[in-house]
Each structure stands twice: as C-alpha cells, then as structure tokens.
Amino acid sequence: MSSVTNQRYTRKQSARERPTICPICYEDVVTHFPRHLSRHHPKDPEVKRMLSLKPNSKERLEIVSAFRKRGYFILKTEKDISYPVRSSKDSDTDHVVCMFCLGLYNKKMLYRHVKVVKVNLMMLLTPARIV
C-alpha cells in the first residue's frame, strides 16, 4: 500500500519494514520502536519526556522521529546504509544529512527542509512573550 504524494516522490517505507538502530543502546529494533524505548531506556531524559506526553500527540511523535533519524544517521555513518526521509524514484539521487535533525534528504531539496527546521528551532529557542 504505497501511496504516491507527487509524481517524482513516493512515500517512505513503513517503519515496520526497515530496521531501526536505537541511538542509546545501538541495538537493531525491527518493530515498535517506541515500545523498545519505553521498556529498555525509561531513565533516559529524552525518553522520560516522551513518556510524559500523550501516546499519539504531535510532540511525542516528533521525539520518536528524532530518535529514528539519529538511528538512521548511525546506520549511514557506520554501515553506509541510507534510509532517506523522503525518497525519489530516481536511484541516482544524492542524499545529504541535515545538520539540525540528522535526517537524510535529497541534495537538491535540502534547502526547503532547512528553512522549515530553522523556523521551528527559532520558535523553540526564543522565550515566550507574556502580554
């Protein structure tokens, strides 16, 4: 069931179909990565933060996604296996690592992603104004 979002791009593989490396213990986790984090690493500060959030909340999903991207970055650097965030039908595309989130993105489209990530980071880092 692969749905096409654009003519040139396809949706990424399901997380269940590809192994994820846990960035904390460097173990291969094939299924249910959030469960692995909650059972094996409940004392880690980021996992504690993840567990304090509601199961399907946007923030929790972003934290799990960040863990996955770090695991894919480890796979790319150590074993030269790449799992891009969004892959093209063209097999000869170059993928580059985003310096903010460690996700693999198409070399030509990285600038779009960086714009969004920079804005999100600036919103997180600036203190909220109380009016």
Image (cartoon, helix red, strand yellow):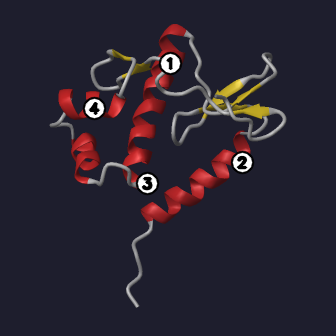
How far across and how far down the image is residue 72, in percent?
49, 23
Dot 1 corresponds to which residue?
18
SS of the residue at dot 1? loop
Dot 3 corresponds to which residue?
58
Disc with the residue nearer the chain's start (4 vs 3) = 4
How far across and how far down the image is residue 82, in percent?
59, 18
The answer to whether the residues at label 4 and label 2 have Cβ atoms under 8 Å apart is no
Dot 4 corresponds to which residue?
35
Q: Amino acid at mark 4?
A: Arg
Dot 2 corresponds to which residue?
112
Q: What is the C-alpha distance between the residues marked 4 and 1?
A: 16 Å
Residue at the extreme right of the image, as rendered: 7
Residue in view at x 38 percent, y 86 percent? 130
Disc with the residue nearer the chain's start (2 vs 1) = 1
Q: What is the C-alpha distance between the residues marked 2 and 1?
A: 26 Å
> Foreground mark, 2 or 1?
1
Q: Amino acid at mark 3?
A: Lys
